[in-house]
């Protein structure tokens, strides 16, 4: 199992920026991919961005060109740089890892974008 702790959420105005971080510990050698998901009130959890162990990235269409995912393998950290934020980006953001034997989730961090 991998333990994940997110940080960096908060309140920002439309057009602003935030950077989320996620620190992984535990069975980190079993990680195949890492990613960020989000869940807005009354909606299902959705993929935001992922990065594989080989560095291949994938983004939701809604965040392409605004968000950048990066992985610091040496420090077991995952980051999400969010620029040009919109009110519709408001959600709880979750760090996720995909292992060969399952998945793990962080506790989530709230991002609120005011208009």
Image: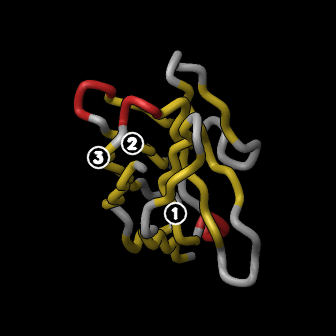
Identify the residue at the far top of this view: 54
Residue shown at 34% from the left, 50% from the top:
21
In the image, residue 101 lies at what x, y percent?
58, 41
Render colour scheme: secondary structure
Q: Which residue is mark 2?
A: 79
User: What distance separates the C-alpha of mark 3 from that of mark 2?
Assistant: 15 Å
Q: CA distance from mark 3 to mark 1?
A: 19 Å
Q: Give the residue at the far left of this rendering.
A: 75
Which residue carries the number 3 mark? Answer: 25
Within 10 Å of disc 2 (Cα), the crowding (few <14, some 14-19, many 20+) is many
Marks 3, 2: nearer the viewer: 3
Q: Are marks 3 and 2 in contact (CB under 8 Å)?
A: no
Q: Quadrant of residue 45?
A: bottom right
Which residue is at the far bottom?
A: 42
Left or right relative to 5: residue 14 = right
Mark earlier in primary sequence (3, 1): 3
Q: Earlier in the sequence, mark 1 or mark 2?
A: 2
Callout 2 secondary element: strand
Residue 25 position, x and y percent, is 29, 46
Q: Is residue 97 shown above or below 38?
A: above
Q: Could you say where residue 96 lies in the image, as x and y percent from the top left? A: 52, 50
Q: Nearer the viewer, mark 3 or mark 1?
A: 3
Measured as percent of width and height from the top left, residue 39 is found at 64, 69
Label 1 with label 2: CB-CB less than 8 Å: no
Q: Taking 19 as reference, is 13 left or right? A: right
User: Quick one: label 1, few (<14), some, or many (20+) residues within 10 Å?
Assistant: many
Residue 93 circle label: 1
Instruction: Find the distance from the CA under tag 1 to the CA under tag 2.
Output: 12 Å
Badge 3 element: strand
Q: Point out the image quarter for the C terminus.
A: bottom right
- The label shown at residue 73 is none
């Amino acid at each position: 199992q991998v333990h994940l702790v997110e940080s960096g959420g908060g309140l920002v105005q439309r057009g602003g920026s935030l950077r989320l971080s996620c620190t992984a510990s535990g069975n980190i050698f079993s990680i195949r991919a890492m990613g960020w998901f989000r869940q807005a009130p009354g909606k299902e959890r959705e993929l935001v961005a992922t990065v594989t162990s080989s560095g291949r990235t994938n983004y939701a269409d809604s965040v392409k060109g605004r968000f950048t995912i990066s992985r610091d393998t040496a420090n077991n950290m995952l980051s999400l740089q969010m620029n040009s934020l919109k009110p519709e980006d408001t959600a709880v953001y979750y760090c996720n890892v995909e292992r060969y034997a399952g998945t793990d989730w962080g506790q989530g961090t709230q991002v609120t974008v005011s208009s």
